[in-house]
Amino acid sequence: MRIIAKCPNCGNSQMLDTGAADRRITCQMCKRLFKVPKMDEVSKAVQIIEQAKGTIYVDQKGKTYG
């Protein structure tokens, strides 16, 4: 599974492995540090992943899109 994390500062999107969940990552574009939420904090995201077996978008606040 993959997660697309969007930087809250510049809006740059990064493709991440699920191992990046609950970690702080650095934006490749603007170098800002931001947190990727835990997967269990975004239960809706987990349900979407299980149903779609694809990619979802999760923002810094844990909102899911996709």
Image (spheres, helix red, strand yellow):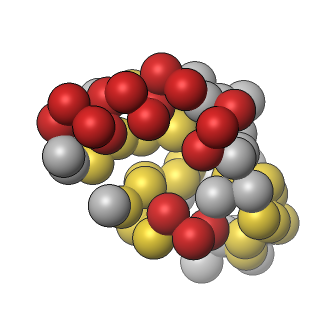
Question: In x, y percent, where is residue 59?
Answer: 59, 37
Q: Is residue 63 left or right of 48 when viewed as pictured?
A: right
Of the pair 20 and 28, the residue shown nearer to us: 20
Residue occupying image coordinates x 53% and y 53%: 5
Of the pair 43 and 63, the residue shown nearer to us: 43
18 shown above or below 35: below
Question: In x, y percent, where is residue 46?
Answer: 44, 35
27 shown above or below 55: below
User: In which quadrant of the rendered image does the C terminus lie?
Assistant: top left
Question: In x, y percent, where is residue 61?
Answer: 72, 30
Residue occupying image coordinates x 52% and y 38%: 58
- Residue 34 position by quadrant: bottom right
7 shown above or below 63: below
Across the whole image, how many numbered discs are drawn on residues?
A: 0
- Residue 51 position by quadrant: top left
6 shown above or below 64: below
Q: Is residue 23 left or right of 4 when viewed as pictured?
A: right
Q: Is residue 63 left or right of 17 when viewed as pictured?
A: right
Residue occupying image coordinates x 55% and y 26%: 43
Question: In x, y percent, where is residue 9?
Answer: 72, 49
Of the pair 38 and 28, the residue shown nearer to us: 38
Q: Is residue 12 visible?
A: yes
Residue occupying image coordinates x 43% and y 55%: 3
Q: Is residue 10 visible?
A: no
User: In which quadrant of the rendered image does the N terminus lie?
Assistant: bottom left
